[in-house]
Amino acid sequence: MKKLVASVLALSVFTSAAMAGGPVVVVEEPMPVVEEQAGTSVGVLPLLLVGIALCVALCGGSDDDDRRRESTIPEEEE
């Protein structure tokens, strides 16, 4: 009987040490929300259109047709 009581007492001492600290609770941190920023190409498009408009305004409308007409008109001789 003493052996039984001693073994139960020893078992209870070791099991309480094994259970010390309680259960381990793992809490996962939420994933950070990554917001996508607007593309930088939105700012480039108006600049590109302004550049094209300036090129058309400054480079367009050549005077070559007027020069050809002037050179084909016969000059009046005196």
Image (tube, grey):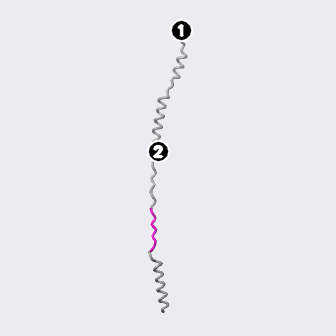
* Front label number (1 vs 2): 2
What's the residue at 54%, 17% (across, down)? 71
Please give the residue where the numbered disc 1 appears in the rendered image. 77
Q: What predominant SS class does the magenta segment belong to? A: loop
Tags 1 and 2 touching, CB below 8 Å: no
* Residue 16 at x, y percent in the picture: 45, 80
Is 12 drawn above or below residue 60 in the view shown?
below
Total tally of numbered discs in the picture: 2
Q: Which residues are magenta?
A: 22-29
Classify mark 2: residues with Cα within 10 Å, few (<14), some (14-19) or many (20+). Answer: few
What's the residue at 46%, 64% (across, down)? 28
* Residue 53 at x, y percent in the picture: 47, 33
Examine the structure image and report whether residue 46 is included in the region drawn in magenta: no
Q: Earlier in the sequence, mark 1 or mark 2?
A: 2
What's the residue at 45%, 49% (across, down)? 37
**What's the amino acid at mark 2?**
Thr
Is 66 drawn above or below residue 36 in the view shown?
above
**What's the amino acid at mark 1?**
Glu
Q: CA distance from mark 1 to mark 2?
A: 66 Å
Q: Secondary structure at mark 1?
A: loop
Q: Which mark is residue 38?
A: none
Q: Nearer the viewer, residue 13 or 76?
A: 13
Q: Nearer the viewer, residue 16 or 52?
A: 16
Examine the structure image and report whether residue 24 is included in the region drawn in magenta: yes
* Residue 34 at x, y percent in the picture: 45, 54
Is 39 drawn above or below residue 54 in the view shown?
below
Is 40 drawn above or below residue 49 in the view shown?
below
What's the residue at 48%, 84% (across, down)? 11
Q: Secondary structure at mark 2?
A: loop
Q: Nearer the viewer, residue 35 or 10?
A: 10
Please give the residue where the numbered disc 2 appears in the rendered image. 40
* Residue 65 at x, y percent in the picture: 53, 22
